[in-house]
Image: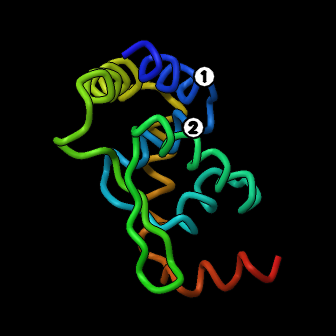
């Protein structure tokens, strides 16, 4: 239990990881969409998502060469569910999170395959 809490608190001790978790509250996202939202290098986003996954805050699904992330489901440990509820309660109205939600609407309209191809060229 203590290890779970340490993993969760460490994972949430970064602004970009908080933004990613909050963005996933709207539903599953391809890693390319998260990269576009955060404006970070693919390797940096991959590291952030790995930390969130290690803390069991997010789950992944592979579809061919694409990786999709979603918030942990109902089978997640209680500390994970509590942390996700706490984040939503305290960050849903944060100006940066609200801006991210608006930006995510535009990103969601883009073709994920084209988005990923463009990021790989970069």
Q: Quadrant of the N terminus?
A: top left
Q: Position of residue 80 (x, y in %)?
A: 32, 28
In this figure, which residue is indicated by the disc labeled 1?
13
* Residue in the picture at 48% in, 83% down: 111
Q: Quadrant of the C terminus?
A: bottom right
Q: Position of residue 24 (x, y in %)?
A: 38, 49
In terms of image quadrants, where is residue 82? top left
On screen, residue 16 versus residue 27, left or right, reads right
Is mark 2 in CB contact (under 8 Å) with mark 1?
yes
The answer to whether residue 110 is above or below residue 56 is below
The answer to whether residue 18 is above or below residue 43 is above
Element under disc 1: loop
* Residue in the picture at 58% in, 23% down: 10
Q: Position of residue 55 (x, y in %)?
A: 47, 34
* Residue in the picture at 19% in, 42% down: 75
Q: Position of residue 25 (x, y in %)?
A: 32, 45
Q: Residues within 10 Å of mark 2 (few under 14, many from 20)?
A: some
In this figure, which residue is indicated by the disc labeled 2?
17
* Residue in the picture at 41% in, 24% down: 91
């Amino acid at each position: 239990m203590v290890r779970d809490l340490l993993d969760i608190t460490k994972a949430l001790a970064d602004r970009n990881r908080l933004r990613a978790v909050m963005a996933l509250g709207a539903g599953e996202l391809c890693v390319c969409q998260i990269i576009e939202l955060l404006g970070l290098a693919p390797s940096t986003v991959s590291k952030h998502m790995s930390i969130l996954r290690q803390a069991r805050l997010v789950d992944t699904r592979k579809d061919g060469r694409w990786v999709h992330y979603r918030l942990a489901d109902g089978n997640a440990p209680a500390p994970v569910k509590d942390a996700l509820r706490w984040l939503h309660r305290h960050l849903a109205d944060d100006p940066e999170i609200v801006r991210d939600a608006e930006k995510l609407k535009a990103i969601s309209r883009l073709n994920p395959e084209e988005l990923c191809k463009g990021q790989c060229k970069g």
